[in-house]
Image (cartoon, helix red, strand yellow):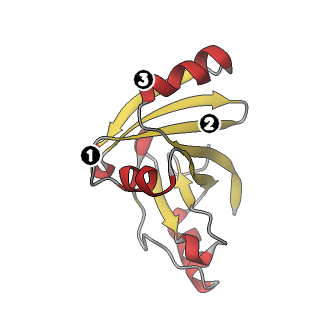
Amino acid sequence: MIKKVDHIGIAVKSIEHALPFYTDVLKLPLLGIEEVESEKVKVAFLKAGETKLELLEPLSDESAIARFIEKKGEGIHHVALGVESIQERINDMKENGIKMIQDVPKKGAGGALVAFMHPKSTGSVLYELCEKNGEAE
């Protein structure tokens, strides 16, 4: 069902200012930077062993990341779980009483299909289901 922790999302005010810590100090390779217009964020992915770190910078005051930073400050935003058959996983979660933020997957960074579980159903942790190219990578 869950293949692995795909990535850990980290909210930052500025990718440009945050990157040197990850690339120069931690020596993590930068995999790429892109904008996800639908979410009003810029993201940078870094390779950390078998998992990736996703830095999330708000591009608008209306983005969920901007609201998160305003409320909680910079830091861990979500844990993404790599899955196969994301719609089946969403249905499984709902059958097990988990409230979903998305009942149908949407397109996320890197072309992945994603859906978030509501943190009120998961012990206050925001989890993302993430399917890449029809299967977890």
60 sits left or right of 27 in the view: left
**Numbered disc in front, either 1 or 2:** 1
Distance between mark 3 and mark 2 Cα atoms: 18 Å
| Disc 3 secondary structure class | helix
Q: Earlier in the sequence, mark 3 or mark 1?
A: 3
**In the image, what residue occupies the spot 60% across and 24% down?**
22
Q: Earlier in the sequence, mark 3 or mark 2?
A: 3
In the image, what residue type sits under mark 3? Glu
The picture quadrant where one finds residue 101 is bottom left
Q: Say which mark, if any, is on residue 16.
A: 3
Label 2 near label 3: C-beta < 8 Å?
Answer: no
Q: Say which mark, if any, is on residue 60.
A: 1
Residue 44 seen: yes
In the image, what residue type sits under mark 2? Lys
The quadrant of the picture occupied by the N terminus is bottom right
In the image, what residue type sits under mark 1? Ser
| Disc 2 secondary structure class | strand
Label 1 near label 3: C-beta < 8 Å?
Answer: no
Is 26 above or below relative to 58? above
Q: Dot 3, crowdedness within 10 Å: few (<14), some or many (≥20)? A: few
Is 24 above or below relative to 63? above
> Which of these two is toward me, 1 or 36?
36
Q: Earlier in the sequence, mark 1 or mark 2?
A: 2
